[in-house]
Image (tube, rainbow, N blue to C red):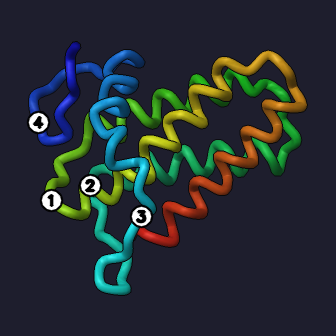
Amino acid sequence: MFLWSCNNTTEKSTTHQETENHAEHQQDESSESIELNNGEKWLVNEEMKPFVMKGEELVNSYIQDNQTDYKALAQQLIEQNNQLIKSCTMNGKSHDELHKWLHPHLEIVKALEDERDATKANETVLQLQHSYQQYHQYFN
């Protein structure tokens, strides 16, 4: 099994499989709740932030504009997540805490990608919106 390393700075395209492997690599950490950094939000490296913000923007626009093509949304979010993972140079406790958010987030995106029922897909989109809200509770 190939495990994607966040600290890998070599230029490499990230595939969906690498994203899933990255999530599996962090699975043990995701079972715990996210902790603040002594009551403060964790800092996320600047290279990663645009991909989180773009993903959140895609979800919010989807909801606000009453869009219905959730498969397209899922693909756009997968691309943002791939870029997020590719840009990760974080390490230590902040990295570990970010993965407690990222792993469940990737699972929700995967569920949206696999969904066949539009009503359930809309519920999943709301879960994604909540996931981004949770990100903002713990990370800067």
Q: Mark 4 or mark 1, which is nearer to you? A: 1
Secondary structure, mark 1, is helix
Label 4, label 1: how many angstroms apart (C-alpha)?
16 Å
In the image, residue 93 sits, relative to residue 127, either above or below, namely below
- Kindly indicate the quadrant of the structure image that contains residue 122: top right
Label 3, label 2: how many angstroms apart (C-alpha)?
9 Å
Please report the residue visible at 38 percent of the width from the left and 30 percent of the height from the top. 82
- Which badge, 3 or 1, is on the more N-terminal residue? 3
Find out whether the residues at labels 1 and 2 contact each other: C-beta distance under 8 Å: yes
Quadrant for the N terminus in the image: top left
Q: Looking at numbered disc 1 in the image, what kind of residue is underneath it? A: Gly
What residue does disc 3 label?
Answer: 34
Q: Mark 3 or mark 1, which is nearer to you? A: 3
Q: Looking at numbered disc 4 in the image, what kind of residue is underneath it? A: Thr
Find out whether the residues at labels 3 and 2 contact each other: C-beta distance under 8 Å: no
- Which badge, 4 or 1, is on the more N-terminal residue? 4
In the image, residue 134 sits, relative to residue 2, either above or below, namely below
- Which badge, 4 or 3, is on the more N-terminal residue? 4
The percent coordinates of residue 90 (x first, y second) are 19, 53
What residue does disc 2 label?
Answer: 96
Secondary structure, mark 3, is loop
What residue does disc 4 label?
Answer: 9
What residue does disc 1 label?
Answer: 92
**Residue density around tag 4, few if under 14, some if 14–19, many if 20 or more, within 10 Å:** few
Quadrant for the C terminus in the image: bottom left
